[in-house]
Amino acid sequence: METLFFLIITLVAIVSAILVITCKNPINSALSLIMTFFCLATYYVMLDAPFMAAVQVMVYAGAIMVLMVFTIMLLNIRVDASKKHSHKLFLGSIIGFFTFFNIAFVLFKSHVAMPTGPYSVDMIKQIGHTELIGKEIFTNFLLPFEITSILLLVAIVGAVILAKKKI
Amino acid sequence: MENLNGYLIVSAILFSIGTIGVLTRKNAIVIFMCIELMLNAVNLTFVALSRHLGNLDGQIFVFFIMTVAAAEAAVGLALIIAFFNNKETIDVDDINLMKW
Amino acid sequence: MFDNVWLIPLLPFIGFLINGLLGKRIKNETVIGGIASAMVLGSFIVSCLTLFNLLSLPGEERQVEVKIFSWITSGVFNADVAFLIDPLSCLMIMVVSGVGFLIHLYSIGYMHGEEGYYRYFSYLNLFTFSMLLLVLGNNLLLMFVGWEGVGLCSYLLIGYYFHKKSAADAGKKAFVMNRIGDFGFLLGIFTLFWYLGSSHNVWTITFTELANNSHLLPTGGIVTVITLCFFLGATGKSAQIPLYTWLPDAMEGPTPVSALIHAATMVTAGVYMIARMNYLFIRSPETLAVIAVIGACTALFAATIGTAQNDIKRVLAYSTVSQLGYMFLAMGVGAFGAGIFHLMTHAFFKACLFLGSGAVIHSMHGALHHAHSNDDAQDMRNMGGLRSKMPLTFITFLLATIAISGIPGFSGFFSKDEILWQAFSNPHHGSLNFLLWGMGALAAGLTAFYMFRLVFMTFFGECRITPKAKDHLHESPMIIVLPLIVLAGLSVVGGFIGIPKVIGDLFGGIPNYLEHYLDPVFKHSEEYMAHHGAHTGIHNIALEWGLMGTSVLIALIGITVAYSLYVANKGIPARFVAAFPGLHRAVYNKWYIDELYDNIIVNPCKAFSQFLWKGFDVIVIDGAVNGVAKTVMACSGVFRLMQSGLISNYAWSMAFGVVVMLSYFILK
């Protein structure tokens, strides 16, 4: 049952990913990308990481993609049929396939280590994923977490400056 | 339940599709979205391995990647808008100022 | 006791800074000249105090070093900014600041209304600073700094009227000639430092330490090399054969500059340097012989040229060269004290002569200007009969002329006679002595001749300028005449501090003050001579009287000849010129030495430089450099094609590279 579900989700994810790169209209690409992100969120749930799934939906599918869609609509680029929308299709595909085969080769040749960490599935289910993540972030990863806020601040300032009329 | 290889293969496929998109498309926003796709493929690997190893570090990493992606989206899109304001285009083939 | 010695060079330097930096804004000539003169006066006062302090010490302690600060310390090499106070340097600072002050005062009047007034005074102050540094420095390097500083100021002041091509050229000539000499000086410093250090482990360039270690030096050999190098430096700075040609040209500068730099002080730096390092020179008989011969030759040679010049300043310039030759003759015969004595008296009477000629030129210039005449204000053929127009100038000029001619009782007589006697009687040169004396005596006669020729042509006879201009001739203002009077007075009485023993005995044993005063400076030389002097000099009082009488007689003959040629029978010079046209032309054209140098040294140098420029530099060096650049450009032209500026190309190459590398690691 679960394997079937996984396969269905995989199919949807790959098809929508292909749509992202093939659609002529950017808005369609964006919508397909949102679909892919939802599929990934589903994977995260299946991997017993409900917090990551929630963040995925909120940040990616929500915030980032909304920003993208807004940008696309704001710029309102006319889809010019006469113009080629992609180039070097053949070469790019070869590179892409080679990338895939490389990764696949690495995956099949290498051995994944046995579980080492303390967080078993049972433990996550018992305590709760969000709480465990929170403990990790606010103890071991406190400094990077704080620095992240500065990164976001810089991004905000940068975006405001860049989007002004005259730079 | 133990389906690590499946997730990793899906991740690889998504990453490759993202790569092809980056290399073949001309619309800057679409290229941008393909990069997001690649980032997400990596995220999937992180979460899957984190779950497999019983270690939450990978998921924390995903958390940070998302932050970076958000910042990147904000700045990147602002750049695209700024460029569009100047050149009336976001076709990467028209962006060729970076040469001698 | 000598705590305020640092003020002596510093005060003129402050004056230089004030006038140099703010002079353009001050504008008021009195203020500018006043500041400059006051600074030098201050320096003179401190010099006097220093001299009194020094005199209050017993003779053997009269050598004090005052360290201001450490300058360079590098391993064994050590150079401080420190001043050496001893009788020699004290005498020099007195002369430099004293005569310097009078000339500053004179300049206030003389340079009145000139463009760049502040520039003139700031250079003059900088010169005084450098000269004082030169004479006060306690080591060779500090002396060299002053040495270069005075050279620079000389260049700047000769080229003061830089918009005139001849003045700019003369400045350049002086600079280049001096550089040849400086090259020798530097080599001398290096060789001395290296030799004493490497063979005796005495790493020093300080004068006192050099003197104390001079017993380590051999006689001749390396010392000859070192001293010849130093002497080359001295010939450049002090205008001796072969590097003298710049000094007559240096007369392009303002006349007070000629008086201060090119007569009284700077050109005597070479003499001072040799006297300062007497313990070195005394150890090399060969160098002493070279110096003596060159000095005597210069004295005679320049005097012959002086007899035929018509430019009043040029006559004085050749006279200066000739008198410097006397000083070097004194150095060369080991009579360091006599040389310094002549240096001092020469500073007085030659400064007076130059300033007097400046007053004449000033007056002539003004008169000719009023009469709208284009005649040369410096040409003696245009002068004449100025005696009645400028009585004070005439009297002072005459006194200085008598002094330089060596008439008994005046300062020049004592110093010149001392040199001639030492040239005859010294123990160094054997049979050469008589020749040296003969050349010196002959030069003395010529000196008397051309100096009185100058006086007769300028002040006697009838005025040769237009009557209209004649009415405008007048005595110079007081500020110009005052220094003349002071200097003329010094020219008359300055010699009495160094009365020779034979004359002193005649008047009840008046001692030779200067000789005793300078004794501590030359004691190392005297010790050396006491040990090594194979045969002592001649001590014959009758002979000394005889020689003295001879030289006075020669001088009187010179004066008589000048009188008979230029006052009594004015036709003779013209007939003489007509009888020996070749000789006159050669002398008038300075024996064609400048042309000789041009053809032997300057033109081949130019041709060689032209070859290096057009041939070597353009083709080989530029070719190599440009060839490298062109090769790089060609290669980068190929690689430039990769930089398309398109993001997709960059992304594609990056992805391609990643895939290739990944494949390599997998398949390895």
Image (cartoon, coloured by chain):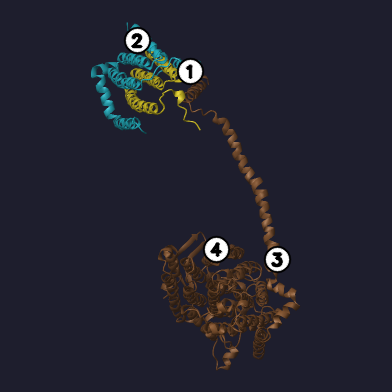
Chain colours: A cyan, B yellow, C brown
Real-space CA distance between mark 3 and mark 1, rounded to the nearest whole angstrom: 83 Å
Circle on res. C162: 4
Real-space CA distance between mark 2 and mark 4, rounded to the nearest whole angstrom: 94 Å
Real-space CA distance between mark 4 and mark 1, rounded to the nearest whole angstrom: 73 Å
Q: Position of residue C64 (x, y in %)?
A: 47, 74
Q: Nearer the viewer, mark 4 or mark 1?
A: 4
Q: Are marks 2 and 3 in contact (CB under 8 Å)?
A: no
Instruction: Say if C59 sits above or below C241 in the image.
Output: below
Q: Are marks 2 and 4 on the same chain?
A: no
Helix, strand or loop under label 2 = helix
The residue sitting at 38% across, 14% down in the picture is B7
Q: Are marks 4 and 1 on the same chain?
A: no
Name the residue tied to disc 3.
C596
Q: Are marks 4 and 1 in contact (CB under 8 Å)?
A: no
Name the one closer to the observer, B66 or B23.
B23
Name the residue tied to disc 1.
A87
Real-space CA distance between mark 2 and mark 3, rounded to the nearest whole angstrom: 106 Å
Q: Nearer the viewer, mark 1 or mark 2?
A: 1
Circle on res. A60: none
Q: Position of residue C653 (x, y in %)?
A: 50, 24
- Tell me which label, 1 or 2, sits earlier in the chain: 2
The residue sitting at 67% across, 58% down in the picture is C605
Q: Position of residue C505 (x, y in %)?
A: 57, 92
Q: Is residue C44 visible?
A: yes
Name the one closer to the observer, C516 or C562.
C562
Instruction: Say if B95 sits above or below C351 in the image.
Output: above
Q: Are marks 1 and 2 on the same chain?
A: yes
Q: Are marks 4 and 3 on the same chain?
A: yes
